[in-house]
Image (cartoon, rainbow, N blue to C red):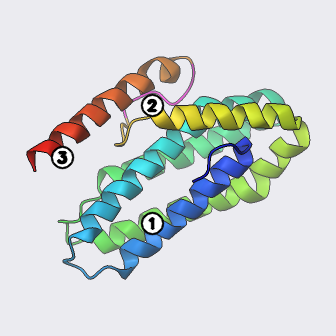
Amino acid sequence: MKPGGDVITELMADHRELEDLFSQIELQPVDHPRRRELADRLTAELVRHTVAEELHLYPAVRKHVPHGAAMADKELADHTRTERILKDLSVDDPRFNDTIAKLKLEVASHMRDEEHELFPKLAATLPPETLDELGRQVRQARQTAPTRPHPSLPNTPPANRLLTPGAGLVDRVRGLLTTNTR
């Protein structure tokens, strides 16, 4: 994804990337090794996207959008369901295809809600400069976010702002060690 967009442009680009990853996974034969690689990448991208939204998008929605607290709470509940599904995602599991289908349905519903409800309300409420700044914050959050689901981490401020970057660092170190030992 090209950096530099406002928060809505950034997150919608993430949505398109996630849709593409789901499509690529669905195209792979059952025992193909690329499935594991794509499932790992999908997981990492979903977690990064989720963390960026939780750290920056939803606090802005709560603060600036009328009835934003209820909208943010609904989106956070979506994230919790997605994290639970991700935790069960394993290419070695005979239910992999069912789990991917369930995950895709959950993520598609969440993206639709954001794109048709939340994003237009946010755009109508905030000036372009603020949307641009939120886009910058989302890009920065994605760089330090975890790459694996951590359902036990808090998803609301201030605890998420303190603990999430540390989990991201641990995940990146674990990923480097795993890659170097294969």
Question: Which quarter shows the N terminus?
Answer: bottom right
Residue 113's spot in the image, x, y percent?
Answer: 69, 57
Q: Residue 140 lies in magenta, yes or no?
A: no
Q: Start and end of the magenta stretch?
A: 152-157
* Horizontal relation, residue 178 to residue 58: left or right: left
Residue wearing tag 1: 21
Type of the residue with mark 1: Leu
Q: Earlier in the sequence, mark 3 or mark 2?
A: 2
Q: Is residue 85 visible?
A: no
Label 3, label 2: how far apart the Cα atoms are = 19 Å
Q: Please determine whether, in this image, residue 145 is positioned above or below residue 161.
A: below
Q: Which residue shows up at 20% across the image and 70% down it? A: 33
Local secondary structure at mark 3: helix
Residues tagged 3 and 2 counted as in contact (Cβ below 8 A):
no
The crowding category of the residue bearing disc 2, from other C-alpha atoms within 10 Å (few below 14, some 14 to 19, many at least 20), is some
Number of the label disc, if any, that sits on residue 144? 2
Label 1, label 2: how far apart the Cα atoms are = 21 Å
Tag count: 3
Type of the residue with mark 2: Thr
Label 1, label 3: how far apart the Cα atoms are = 21 Å
- Between circles 1 and 3, the one closer to the viewer is 3
Number of the label disc, if any, that sits on residue 179? 3
